[in-house]
Image (cartoon, helix red, strand yellow):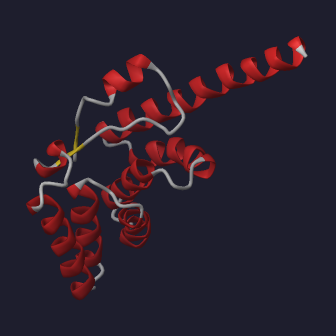
Amino acid sequence: MKAYLSAIFLLLVFSVPFSYADYKQAVADYSQGRYEKAIQELKPDLERNPDWEFGHRLLGLCYLGLNNNALAANSLKRAVELKSPAFSAYYGLGQAYFNMKKYNECIDALNKGEALAAAGKAEPAARDGVLSVEPVPGCRHESHERDAQQPVGLG
């Protein structure tokens, strides 16, 4: 029984840092305009956590940076479906729709983002046009929570 509990503990301990490292690297890559590299870092985390709003938001903004508007719209739409508290998700979605000449969808996305900001429900950093950094679900690192308070620019 003791060996079984030890094995579970080791599995949990060693699985979290890998996710944490991928997440931190994706944020760093995004901040430096290395969107393709950030996308590769995010994909495994999103496969493990398909309801991770921040991951879909960051993925969408990376695709937007690469001018891949269709994939950007898909990822940002998923972030919005997951009730994103960040104006950048709605703004990025509106921008992707605009670039694809889907003007009605663009207006809808921007109106939803504006309503979120006007109601005071948007993240404070998001209202200022900044992408807030959030931890990977299930990751419990003190330094991670400290880092989550640091904003990352939209690029």
Res 16 seen here: yes
Q: Quarter of the image holding residue 29?
A: top left
Q: Which one is in front, 31 or 128?
A: 128
The percent position of residue 3, horizontal first and vertical second, equals: 88, 13
Q: Quarter of the image holding residue 131?
A: top left
Q: Is residue 43 above or below residue 75?
A: above
Res 155 seen here: no
Q: Locate residue 148 relative to residue 125 in the image: left or right.
A: right
Q: Is residue 63 above or below residue 55?
A: below
Q: Is residue 53 above or below residue 25?
A: below
Residue at screen point 19% across, 55% down: 121
Residue at screen point 47% across, 42% down: 37
Residue at screen point 68% across, 25% down: 12
Q: Locate residue 19 relative to residue 98 in the image: left or right.
A: right
Q: Which one is in front, 128 or 139?
A: 139
Q: Locate residue 58 relative to residue 104 in the image: left or right.
A: right
The percent position of residue 79, horizontal first and vertical second, equals: 39, 60
The percent position of residue 60, horizontal first and vertical second, equals: 38, 59
The percent position of residue 127, horizontal first and vertical second, equals: 13, 51
**Image quadrant in which the N terminus is located:** top right
Q: Quarter of the image holding residue 17?
A: top right
Q: Is residue 99 above or below residue 24?
A: below
Q: Which residue is the extreme one toward the front?
A: 1
Q: How many marks do you count on the picture?
A: 0
